[in-house]
């Protein structure tokens, strides 16, 4: 695409704030030089509860010993940084021995995950871990901030929606049932209660990871699911090669330690130079596959602040999806309800409503939804709706030896433009991608805002993904985890009436 009228401008890389109120643009630099953000929530010790097989405990202890010492970078590149050790980075002790260890025989885990019926296999395998955690929470006094669930590779392999167990390994199902009959029994219950109980587990998502987190939401347990091959790759070798290709050990340590620190309520970093009173909301929709009505979907919202703190709200389930437009839309009253929940949560945190509230979504919200959102916020709050999509219609090439720099943008008119959140990064002296970077399409659909400021905000929101310690993501955090959050919100039929929970429960 060529157009002499297009003018390419540039937004400076947003800064992050670390310990001692120091600022820099790269998370690893900031953590190395200044440590994490200071605050009353900074943990003195990692209070970890471990649920695993006996071998998983061995792998876990060995890994904790490894991350307590420096780990050299795997490659000589600017974005591959040595990991100096957990306590050296975060000023927090991570003991080798967990607060509690809940062991499950590996033979029991493998026998259960290999059940031929995938619904029964995944549900029953999740139960092995869930029951251990739930029992500890109900019966023991020692507080656990984060549950490390270390699973054998077969749980990952067979604990996903499209997984199938080979016939030679498959175990017979404990009960006879199928998805079609289970769906029928949801609307037309059987006279035999045991049939209804068995049918209930077919309404859970076929994902070990999502189902475990969803079933523990009512306990407020924070969970990190880790594969044994992630923390002990050297123990899984075939003919001298690792059975799974991973990042280098230093990168794995950076990523896993950052998310663990965040999940125990630490703050690795926050955005610097953010306007006070600003709140960002990402809309989440997920089809309800257990319902006969193909329009049925769950709606949720993710609220984020400049600190990186996030809260997830579960909205109502209803016929929000249209197969004709392939879009999700809410009625006016439901949009108002979500907006009111967001404002209430913001007031509880700050004692006043937000001055600006930006709603991010992949779909352009319609006028009925917009009126509902407006009705749900006070008059003093400026509300703006932004549509953010991947732009696939054109590419822009650089005249240099590297791609377009990250931060470039094109303003088509005051309410629409393109923003490159991926591209060449001078600090890293590289582009972390394999093809010509594509921009995000940014549209101000409703409300009034400065387009360049909107783009600055979105570029900043690509830098607060605490699930990994990287330079930036390609999409803002308001939309980055939308699919994951939606899947957990619908992974169990029991999650309908849960109160708003911090974002750390979902990632």
Image: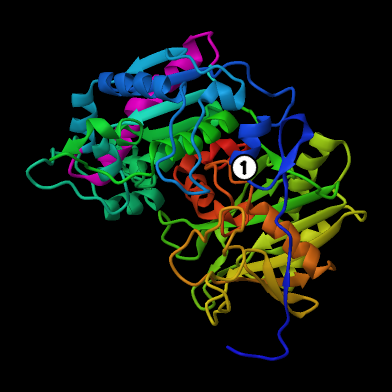
Residue drawn at point x = 74 percent, y = 22 percent: 40
Tell me if residue 215 can be seen. Answer: no
Residue 374 on image: x %, y %: 82, 61
Q: Specify the quadrant of the image occupied by residue 153.
A: top left
Q: Is residue 379 left or right of residue 203?
A: right
Q: Is residue 280 above or below residue 159?
A: below
In the rendered view, tell whether residue 423 sits above or below residue 381. below
Q: Quadrant of residue 417?
A: bottom right
Residue 238 on the magenta segment? no
Residue farthest left in this picture: 168
Q: Is residue 134 magenta?
A: yes
Q: Secondary structure at mark 1?
A: helix
- Dominant SS of magenta comes to helix
Q: Residue furthest right?
A: 380
485 left or right of 75 in image? right
Q: Is residue 57 visible?
A: yes
| Residues rendered magenta in the picture | 114-143
Q: Is residue 283 left or right of residue 78?
A: right
Q: Relative to 414, is 499 above or below?
A: above
* Spot occupied by residue 419 in the image (x, y as percentages of width and height): 66, 69
Residue 336 in percent (x, y) is at 75, 56
- For the point 62% across and 42% down, which residue is it? 27
Read off the residue under disc 1.
Answer: 27
């Amino acid at each position: 695409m060529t157009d002499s009228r297009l003018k390419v401008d540039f937004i400076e890389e947003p800064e992050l704030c670390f310990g001692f109120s120091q600022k820099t643009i790269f998370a690893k630099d900031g953590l190395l030089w200044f440590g994490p953000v200071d605050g009353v929530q900074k943990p003195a010790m990692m209070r970890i509860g471990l649920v695993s097989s006996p071998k998983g405990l061995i792998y876990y202890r060995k890994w904790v010993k490894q991350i307590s010492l420096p780990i050299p970078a795997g490659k000589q590149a600017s974005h591959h940084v040595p990991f100096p050790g957990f306590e050296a980075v975060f000023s927090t002790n991570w003991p080798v021995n967990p607060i509690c260890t809940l062991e499950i025989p590996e033979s029991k885990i493998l026998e259960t995950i290999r059940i031929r019926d995938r619904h029964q296999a995944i549900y029953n395998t999740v139960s092995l871990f869930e029951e251990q955690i739930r029992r500890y929470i109900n019966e023991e006094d020692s507080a656990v901030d984060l549950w490390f669930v270390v699973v054998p590779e077969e749980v990952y392999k067979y604990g996903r929606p499209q997984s199938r167990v080979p016939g030679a390994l498959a175990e017979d199902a404990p009960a006879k049932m199928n998805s079609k009959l289970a769906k029928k029994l949801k609307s037309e219950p059987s006279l035999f209660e045991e049939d209804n109980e068995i049918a209930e587990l077919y309404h859970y998502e076929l994902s070990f990871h999502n189902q475990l987190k969803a079933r523990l939401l009512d306990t407020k347990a924070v969970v990190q699911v880790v594969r044994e091959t992630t923390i002990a790759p050297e123990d899984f070798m075939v003919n001298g090669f690792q059975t799974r290709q991973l990042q280098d050990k230093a990168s794995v340590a950076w990523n896993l330690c950052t998310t663990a620190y965040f999940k125990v309520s630490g703050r690795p970093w926050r955005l610097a130079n953010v306007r006070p009173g600003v709140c960002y909301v990402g809309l989440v929709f997920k089809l309800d596959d257990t319902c006969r009505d193909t329009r049925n979907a769950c709606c949720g919202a993710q609220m984020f602040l400049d600190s990186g703190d996030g809260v997830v709200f579960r909205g109502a389930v209803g016929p929000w999806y249209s197969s004709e437009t392939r879009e999700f839309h809410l009625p006016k009253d439901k949009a108002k309800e979500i907006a009111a929940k967001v404002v209430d949560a913001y007031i509880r945190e700050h004692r006043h409503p937000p001055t600006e509230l930006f709603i991010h979504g992949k779909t352009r919200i319609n006028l009925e939804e917009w009126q509902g959102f407006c009705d749900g916020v006070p008059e003093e709050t400026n509300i703006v709706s932004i549509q953010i999509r991947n732009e696939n219609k054109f590419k822009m090439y650089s005249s240099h030896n590297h791609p377009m720099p990250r931060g470039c943008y094109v303003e088509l008119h005051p309410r629409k433009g393109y923003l490159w959140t991926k591209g060449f990064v001078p600090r890293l002296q590289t582009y972390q991608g394999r093809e010509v970077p594509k921009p995000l399409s940014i549209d101000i659909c409703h409300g009034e805002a400065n387009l360049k400021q909107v783009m600055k905000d979105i570029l900043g929101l690509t830098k607060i993904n605490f699930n990994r310690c990287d330079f930036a993501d390609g999409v803002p955090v308001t939309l980055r985890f939308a699919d994951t959050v939606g899947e957990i919100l619908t992974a169990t039929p029991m999650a309908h009436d849960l109160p708003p929970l911090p974002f750390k429960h979902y990632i």
